[in-house]
Every structure is written in structure tokens, then in C-alpha cells.
Amino acid sequence: MKNKLVSIKEAVDMIKDGDTLMIGGFLAVGSPLKVIDALVETDKGNFTLIANDTSFVDRGIGKLVVAKKFKTIYASHIGTNKETGRQMSENETEVNLVPQGTLIEQVRAGAYGLGGILTPTGVGTEVEKGKQKITIDGKEYLLELAKRGDVSLIFANVADKAGNLKYHGSTQNYNVAMAGASKITIVYAEKVVEVGQISQDEVKVPGVLVDYIIDGGAING
């Protein structure tokens, strides 16, 4: 079995200038906070972000926004981070607001190898501009293309050494969908256990979708 365990430094070293990053979490709940903090400290940037939100100015993804690491952002909302709004208003960062359900299905389509999804959300609004419309049984849908990244930075409460992931409550949010939606998937796990210690009924992400694991328990210990 391949050794998937890496340090935070090794993980951050895999990220290149200009990469498209998918980052899990919902207002920093279920975000790989320590990996984000390490990335803030590098001189890398010019990233494209795909995430549910941009968190807060002093936590999670918001720290990357404050550090001006993104050239482009795709997110469902930015209202909890005034710096994102300021950068958008001043044309410092391209910010694309995407309906939440549409965004996660675009990510899921990317992970599953689909070309995109059809959704009625946004038909007849600003959202439809520049997009193909398809009529099915008399109803109009927008074709929303799949989203894929260079690196998915996700979180898990527990991972085994093969990369099978377990979650508690809402921490699974975008993390589950983003696993496998990028060329490389890196998970920060609060705890790493041996293969077989996670019940197959508890696995939310199979190890085949995870390339590298950071053992947060070893760091905290």
C-alpha cells in the first residue's frame, strides 16, 4: 500500500502559483485550517478558488483573501468577509457568485467525470448570461459546466492510512464532494488510524479518491 502520509510543508510544496484550489468547509467549519495558515505564509499566489464561501477575515479561507492570494473566486456567498467584497468592488479580484446548489453539483460533476449539470436555477436572471439553455419536456435548464481543480484541500475528522475518511456532523459539507474533483486531493485529518479501524458503514470518502494525508493528531500531539 502506498504511503500517503505527508507533512503540511510537503503538502503546501505541491501547490503551484496559479493553481485552481478547491477548499472544503462552510464558514471555516470543516476547513483544513492549519494547511491554509501554512499557505498564507508562502509567496505563492495568483490562485483560483472554488469554495462554498470566503469565511471570515481572520479565519480559514478568509486569511488567503486578506493576503491577496486569489485572482479569481467562485463561491456561493462572501457576506461574512468584507475584504472579499472590497476586492470585488475595487476590481482587485474577480469574484463569481454561484448559487450554492449549483456550485456543489458542478464540483460533484467534476469528481465523477461528468461534463456538467442541467439546472433551472438562474433561468431568466443574470445567472443565465453567456450560458447554454436546453429545453427538456417544455422546461428550460441552464447547462452549468463541471468544475475541476489542480488541488483539493479538504478536512476529515478521521482518516485511515489508505485515505478512507470519516466525518462528524456538518464537517463533511463540501469536503466529500471535492475529494477526487482535482488532480491532487490532500486531506488534513484530525486523527489517522490503521486500515480497518473505520467501519465501512462510516466511510464518506473512499481512499481511492485521496492522494495524500496530513496527520493532524501527530502535529497536535
Image: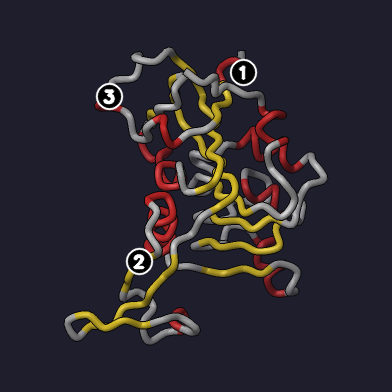
| Label ID, residue 200 | 3
Could you tell which of marks 3 and 1 lies nearer the N-terminus? Answer: 3
Left or right of 67 in this view: 35: left
Is the C-beta separation of discs 3 and 2 under 8 Å? no
Could you tell which of marks 1 and 2 lies nearer the N-terminus? Answer: 2
Would you place residue 217 above or below residue 14 in this image?
above
Q: Secondary structure at mark 3?
A: helix
Residue bearing mark 2: 117
Would you place residue 13 above or below residue 215 in this image?
below
Residue at left offset 55%, top offset 30%: 212
Tell me the quarter of the picture where residue 87 sits.
Answer: bottom right
Query: How packed is label 2: few (under 14 Cα within 10 Å), some, or many (20 or more)?
Result: some
Image x and y of residue 175, in percent? 45, 42
- The amino acid beneath tag 3 is Gln
In the orientation shown, which residue stands out farthest toward the right? Answer: 43
Tell me the quarter of the picture where residue 7 sits.
Answer: top right
Residue at left offset 46%, top offset 31%: 156
Residue at left offset 51%, top offset 45%: 24
Left or right of 22 in this view: 204: left
Residue bearing mark 1: 220
